[in-house]
Image (spheres, rainbow, N blue to C red):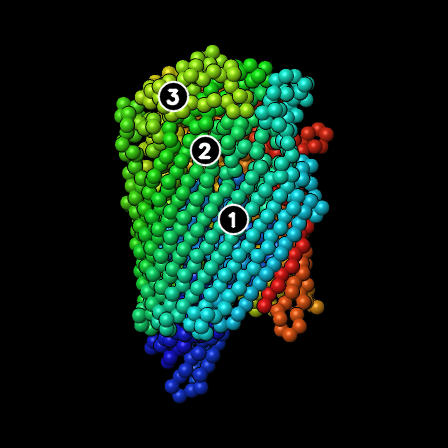
Amino acid sequence: VEVSVRNIDTNYKRVANTDDAGRYAVGPVPLGTYEVTVTPATLQPSTQQVYVSLGGRATADFRLGISPVRQAINVLANEAPAIEPAQTFSKSILTDIQLRNLPSNGRRIRNMFLLTPSTQIEPECGGFAISGQKGLFTNINVDGGDYTNTHWCGHVEVSPTFTMEALQEFQVLRSTFSAEFGRSTGGIINLATKSGTNEFHGTGFYLFRNHNLTKHDPFKREQIGLGQQFGGSIGGPLKADRTFFFTAAEFQHNTKPVKVLYSELDIQNIRNTSGAQSLLMVAPEDQLEALSLSQSIVNRIDHHFNNRNNVMGRVDFTRNKVTDTAGPFIMTQGIGADSTTNRSVQNASPINNRTNVTGMMQLTSVLSNRHVNEVRVELAKEYRPWDPGTGPEVTVRNGSPVQTVAIYGPQATGLAYGNNGYKFTDRRYQFIDNFSIVTGEHTMKFGVDSNRVNGRTTFNPGSNGTYRFDSLQSFVDRQPAQYTQFAGTGDLNATMHQVAFYVQDEWRALPGFTISPGFRYEMALLPDYYAPTVPKNRFPLATSISSDKELIAPRLGLAWDVRNNAKTVMRAAAGIFYAAPYMPLFEQAMLGNGGNPELSSSVTINGAANIRSALQSAGIDLATADLSRLPVFTGAQLNQLVAPENRITGQTVFFFDPNFRLPRSVQFRGALEQEIAHGVTAQFDYTQINVARIDRVRNINLMPPVPDATGRPIYSSARPYPNYGFVYMTESSARSLYRGFTSTLNMRRQRFTVDATYTLGFSYSHDDHERGISGANYVDAYNLNNEYGYSNIDERHQFASSALIYLPSGFDVSAFVRFNSGRPFSPSTGVDSNGDGVVRDRPVLNGQVVRRNTFRNIGYSDVSVRLQRHFALAKDKGRLSVFGEIFNLFNFDNVEIGGNQFTYGPSLSIPSTNPNFGKIKDTQGNFLTGGVLRTSPLQLQVGLRYEF
């Protein structure tokens, strides 16, 4: 029997024939709504309409004559909202209707992501964490092309992403996904863009909020001055049934006032001194306007050469710029949380400026009714120009007994915020070829995936020199206590190349029973050290960085449609998965192994007399230097002062364990899905992900410690490698374990859509660092087992729900709800208690150091709503919608205990030396400085939307 499939928007057609058992399959096809027609030889054609979603299967059943024949159209392109009886993996989808109509603070992908089960924004980088996995271990794809950043925590939530105006669907795969996908131990985010159709359609929108529509946060800070978002889209035919275009653009412009105030001058009653006045002339207090600008433009074209050959091309552009901001970037509008700062941020270099351009093309060729080939090519460039500022960056603080006032001029050290001297350009070259064999019984896919990333990086924090003054008077007298300058270029050119071969089958072995075996082989060709210019200084164990060519990943999925009616489906799946390599890990070792001081080394001079003498040797008189632009050494002057081969003493070095391997996870999932009523489904599943070989950094330049009377291990000053300071080895020795029980309820009715999910999760790990550029994340280098405990993203309870309700008279109401329990934290002593040179020690209890993450932080709550009214315009000119949104409707504080309140003291067996330990408020009920704000206060936003 012939079966034809037609896309109702573009008239794209495909044809198949049933086998002897009455089964047929068509795939893969683009997502969209299809008309399925069966044409028996002696009967009238019969037609059904189905929706094919991203990576999903749609089922159309027909009864021919008097003989019931079940015919399943398994379209391998995208998923329908009803139960999919042959699906074996875990998947959550948000449709175009939900993306358009649910409240979304800042219209960012993160808000949609948090509506799906077992998800959260991890605290270190703001990355997308799925099923207890690091944000780094999540892979992001757009139209099947890799969109994951290889340098800065993947794609973090403060970065602009695709305009939601361009998205047709948003999908999250939580675990046990097919062999077609890789480079993730936990989850994958798939985004599908819209295409044009045979009719012209377009949109335009404008959103507005300001300080009058926003409450102050719990710290009495203003969170936004003015926020505006606007954009639109248009798409349609260039030639009917043949060529289609789609374009979407979105722009965001947000501001807020930021005050630079040195209140410490008043607290110490020294504002009127000559030193303070000199400081204020160099870096005056000021009121600035923090600014966040973002742009996102997506262009797509689809062309059908004929019903057998189709091509899709997409070019997208995103840009984000932030200036004069203060505090952590927790805001969905991309501005720091602080309204006042004791740092002259006008000379700080923001760390989230970026420009991204991606081009992609896909050719789909139907070689026969059973054979389809897809070729996909992607070229992408991402540039983050984090250049040092041009003026002095000043911080005024009370650091008694020393560093009452510190001035960093002209650059601040560190990677947190400010002039960090870290910029990079990534270029990605990806090629994918999928060949599918589709029959009534089998749907097999063979493929190759080549993903090459070249990174050109400059990492030179402190290249402009750093002065430290311990008092205002020493600043006026040009008497610094310390001078430090990065002495190398910091320039690297590194390439990672990942190649994968895979095969995946969907075998409809019996009516209602599907077996999905898969196999994926990957290899990761990793960058290696540069040849040393000073071989004697290279750390002796830094011999090579080995590529990982043994990434073998078998997978198996089962789906049982219990009654063969798509009402009750049981699923089970298991497999092996590997994380992608993370570029900063390798760059850190390539730069800092000691053998290439021309790339990375540092010169530190202590004492005012020594600093003056060193500058004098270069012909510089510090005593008469301009305080607003203190002198720095040139590269040649630094080489004359301290020859590159003589800088190794006491330097921190990094190298890779020769046995380093990429993280590997073993996953299992079991699930039961039940249709309760028409359009209402419920699901319960259990997921277990055991990850081994997670990377961590360990200092091996320590002798074994000796416990003191309290049981704390104490390190001596003796070092196995006395010529070096810290010697950090990157090794793959950490592990994590996640167990999660998830229940979901999905309701799809004519007048409303409701999704609800609850997860009871347990997440354990040794190490949770995300940035890659790091030092020790443990207490005792000789007892790393004591680090295994609840992970930093262990949220025991997660509940999320969304609803969209169509009311009479053109009104709609929608809502977003999320409640999470608190994440764990570790108590600290606040000092280097064990003598290893790192301030990361925890208290002791009963003769041993307490395990990591033994206390719980505050939970998180959010309820946001939207009310909108639609007006049909005369003469079919389209529809105008007016709406208002309230984010954080109940103004939940959502303040977590901050780092200052993690300090307990030396022992848990005695009262804390910190009266504010574990608290978010002081005795007067005010929120303590250092508390972490996780979300915005109540905000009202109004908007207009036009559609035609």
Is residue 753 placed above or below 823 in the rendered structure? below
Q: Disc 1 marks which amino acid?
A: Pro
Is residue 355 placed above or below 45 in the rendered structure? above
Q: Position of residue 314 (x, y in %)?
A: 43, 59
Q: Which residue is mark 1?
A: 160
Q: Is residue 561 visible?
A: no
The CA distance from mark 1 to mark 3 is 42 Å
Q: Which residue is at 58% across, 29% downward?
A: 343
Please state, as top left, top right, bottom left or bottom right, where the N terminus lies in the image: bottom left
Q: Secondary structure at mark 2?
A: loop
Q: Position of residue 560 (x, y in %)?
A: 43, 63
Q: Which one is nearer the viewer's eye here, 100 or 241? A: 241
The CA distance from mark 1 to mark 2 is 22 Å
Using the rendered view, name the quadrant where residue 813 is placed. Answer: bottom right
Disc 3: CA contacts within 10 A as few (<14), some (14-19) or many (>=20) = some
Q: Disc 2 marks which amino acid?
A: Gly
Q: Which residue is mark 2?
A: 421
Q: Which residue is mark 3?
A: 637
Is residue 415 placed above or below 872 in the rendered structure? above
Q: Position of residue 824 (x, y in %)?
A: 54, 36
The CA distance from mark 2 to mark 3 is 20 Å
Of pointers 2 and 3, the one earlier in the residue sequence:
2
Q: Which residue is at 35% across, 51% downward?
A: 429
Q: Position of residue 73 (x, y in %)?
A: 42, 71
Q: Which one is nearer the viewer's eye here, 489 or 736? A: 489
Q: Which residue is at 48% across, 76% downward?
A: 48
